Amino acid sequence: MDVHVIDHPLAQSRLTAMRDARTDSATFRAALHELTTMLVYEAARSFPVETYPIQTPVTDAEGTRLANPPLLVPGLRAGLGMADAALGLLPESSMGFVGLARDEETYEPRAYMESLPRDLSGLPVLVLDPMLATGGSLEHCCRLLADRGCTDITVLCVLAAPPGIDRLARSGLPLRLVTASVDAELNDRKFIVPGLGDAGDRQFGGMPRF
Ligand SMILES: O=P(O)(O)OC[C@H]1O[C@H](OP(=O)(O)OP(=O)(O)O)[C@H](O)[C@@H]1O
Ligand SMILES: O=c1cc[nH]c(=O)[nH]1
Ligand SMILES: [Mg+2]
């Protein structure tokens, strides 16, 4: 599996704000928004383009546009904070949604929402979820996409941990990963270390789970 780490100074400064436990929710969301713009920009570098004729104020010229804009799929809740930034750079894209909550005793994902086009053949997909920890949630999400015929998945994360990367690499799914950091490890509660805590709670506040 191709893993691309964005170690740009501007990306790392936003990541630092997100890691810092003193950062409030509004500042955390703003940093995630800006970092997502950078992740999408880098991920899109390899997207195929097509040309079409335009006129500048001076002469005829050749314009460029994406040949096949991707479907954007934020993983609820935490991926919601990446959705607006991704759509800002990819305004031609459509958006689907997958809702997943990790059971904090078994660490297995529980799917509670799925709103996706029935047929994804021929459509590239950009999955948005800030955290790849054990990889259970993102593997589940990417399998839903592959089951609908998707053969081109790019996962955008803020942080990825080695067990999650290994799990996605072993999954056999057609995907690549773009992340701002590969962190050291998971702790005994399967949180990423050094990490940034619970990305959903840091954006939206904690809540009782079902
Ligand atoms: O790789 P994993 O071990 O599966 O963990 C990562 C998942 O955990 C977080 O979501 P969470 O389940 O906390 O839901 P939330 O977004 O509603 O907070 C995160 O956004 C990922 O989806
Ligand atoms: O560190 C982690 C692991 C899973 N989910 C999060 O939000 N953070
Ligand atoms: Mg959470």
Image (spheres, rainbow, N blue to C red):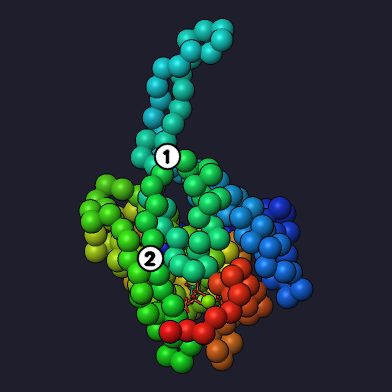
In the displayed structure, 152 sits above or below 88; it is below
Horizontal arrangement in the rendering, residue 199 relative to residue 50 (left or right): right
**Mark 1 or mark 2, earlier in chain:** 1
- Residue under pointer 2: 98
**What residue is shown at x 31% (from left), y 58% (from top)?**
116
In the displayed structure, 69 sits above or below 194; it is above
Image quadrant in which you'd find residue 108: bottom left
**Percent from the top left, x then y, of residue 68?**
36, 40
Q: Nearer the viewer, residue 163 or 203?
A: 203
**What residue is shown at x 40% (from left), y 79% (from top)?**
109
**Percent from the top left, x then y, of residue 19?**
69, 71
Horizontal arrangement in the rendering, residue 158 relative to residue 134 (left or right): right
**Percent from the top left, x then y, of residue 170?**
36, 73
* Residue 170 visible in image: no
Callout count: 2
Q: Nearer the viewer, residue 112 or 192?
A: 112
Q: Amino acid at mark 2?
A: Val
**What residue is shown at x 41% (from left), y 44% (from top)?**
93
Question: Dot 1: what SS?
Answer: loop
Query: Which numbered disc covers residue 92?
Result: 1
Image quadrant in which you'd find residue 47: top left
**Percent from the top left, x then y, of residue 77?**
49, 69
What residue occupies the far right of the structure in this picture?
A: 22
**What residue is shown at x 37% (from left), y 80% (from top)?**
110
Which quadrant of the figure contains the C terminus? bottom left
Asked if the residue at label 2 sits under 8 Å from ligand 1, the reply is: no
Q: Amino acid at mark 1?
A: Glu
Horizontal arrangement in the rendering, residue 15 relative to residue 126 (left or right): right
